[in-house]
Amino acid sequence: MIDRLREEPVTLSSLEEIIDEFDFLDDSEDQIEYLIDLGLDLPAIDQSLKTEQFLVHGCQSNVWLDVEFVGNPALMLVKAESDAMIVNGLVALLMAIFNGKTAEEALEINVREIFDRLGLDRHLSPQRKNGLNGMVQRIKVAARLQLT
Amino acid sequence: MASLSLPTVESIREQFPILQQPDSHGRDIVYLDNGASTQKPRCVIDKEVEVYTKYYANAYRGVYEFGQRIDDEVELSRESVRGLIGAASKEEIIFTAGTTMSLNLLAYAWGSHVLKPGDEIILSRMEHHANIVPWQLVAQKTGATIRYVPLDDQYRFDGQAFEQILNSRTKIVSLTGMSNVLGATIPVQQVAEAAHSVGAVFILDAAQSILHQPTDVMKQGIDFLAFSGHKIYGPSGVGVLYGKQELLEQMPPFLGGGHMIDQVFDDHSTWAAAPAKFEAGTLPIAQAIALRPAIELIIEVGFDWIEKHEKQLLIQATEQLQKIPGLKIYGPAVSEKGAMVSFTLEGAHPQDLAFLLNRHGVCVRHGHHCAMPLHKILDVSATVRASFGLYNTHQEVDKLTEAIHQARKKLRLT
């Protein structure tokens, strides 16, 4: 078994930081490499979540995703991981977007707008977009369930 | 092209304009996705331009000068294909859109013609989807059954199992000449003989093998053969279906339309002789014509040189890659495979790896390579494939290896 060198625990990047870095990098390949870095820094999820129940369909790579609401008021906490680091970077981006939001706030977020703003749409393959939509859908469904 | 008494990879490489320029990031292009499609030499590009700038017209339609010239050029190309595969006559060479089209034509026309409920079609476990799905369609329609030849524990076509599966109900044996993932080849002549011994026809999917090794349909006993122009340094959009004349005479047409008829009446039609019978509609004209210079280049370089050169690249790549921690190569020993290496790297997802390799200008394919059943057997959802062509160099293999080392570092693999 090969281990990934875990660097010192990192604080996850905020959405503002990610947007700034994307603007700074400009080049699409540099941006994807940055996504890989974000993915590599993402903490691993609990092994117990890596089951069919939490698997997001439509992804080329495996993505496991669970959503919890914690505290009062209940705030969203996305726990997700992919075996592909580019996708894990997208997971980090979604976490930056949704974590700490109430269910109402989460439902109002237009993810497409944010991705357009980042210019990500251009260099995501249709399959990857499919997978991304699958993840967003899961998060939105969880928010809706929280309100019922 | 200039006459090459002794080809060198440099002199071959010079003929491919796309390899002479850096990519949009200023990197040298290390093109190792030849299994998906090959780059085009200047002579092929020039030929297509020549057709469109000097004498373009539809084929087999006009008696005017351009029309005559086009007909002559298409026939010259047909003859060059005949020479490449050792067919008895150029009337056995049908131009199609590509291997997929050729195999679909066969499945539909030959399959529907001969298959009855209970009959069997034999494929192997390392087929491309293009040599699986068309047979599934015809099997569902006719009530025939598909049987698969397994691979042995060294990822080789299991010849013994094949002979056991073969029986009097076997009507069609359709196999790849070289797996597009494993690189594994098959003993074509033996397989063809065995198929004939039970009265089956033998079809060779030569999409991957045709550019790496010599093919001789008569000597090897191949009844039908399919390949694509774009995988043999020729144009995209044109492919070939070879069929033995007596079989082409028996086989009903696939597409109906212009050029394929003899007489058209109100309620029925009669057919032209092959190849016209299977070339309904307008051909990919310029592409069919520009296939000839690609074939001439291969013949001029020679399969002796190609096989030796590509084997050296394969040996070098295999030796270097298998030393990389966590890297696993899927395929038989180098002595039993063509010039490609499919692999996984523990801890690295194939799509991350393919992206990171491209950061060093290295172009490889990742995914299931249109061979999902095979990947199921390999027990991986995807692999990364580096596939070589006659213009690849030892320095490029070094760059592949170095790029994988860099990707491991980037992905923080120990």
Image: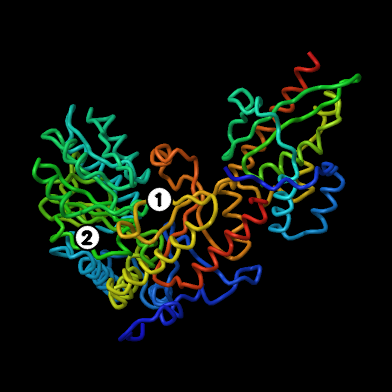
Q: Residue at x 18, y 27 (%)?
A: B117
- Give residue B147's quadrant in the image: top left
Residue B253 left/right relative to B361: left
Q: Secondary structure at mark 1?
A: loop
Q: What's the amino acid at mark 2?
A: Ile
Q: Disc 1 residue type?
A: Val
The answer to whether residue B64 of the structure is visible from this angle is no
The residue that mark 2 highlights is B93
Residue A40 is situated, as x and y percent measured from the top left of the image, at 71, 46
Label 2 marks which chain's residue? Answer: B
**Depicted B243 relative to depicted B303: above or below:** above
Residue A94 seen: yes
- As measured in the structure, the alpha-carbon distance from the residue carrying label 2 to the one carrying label 1 is 28 Å
User: Left of B132 or right of it: where is B250?
Assistant: left
First-in-chain label (2 vs 1): 2
- Tell me the quarter of the image containing the N terminus of chain B: bottom left
Q: Nearer the viewer, residue B308 or B351?
A: B308
Q: Residue at x 33, y 49 (%)?
A: B101
Residue at left offset 83%, top offset 44% = A13
Residue farthest to the right, as pictured: A72
How many other residues sit within 10 Å of disc 1, few (<14), some (14-19) or many (≥20)? many
The residue lying at 40 percent from left, 50 percent from top is: B181
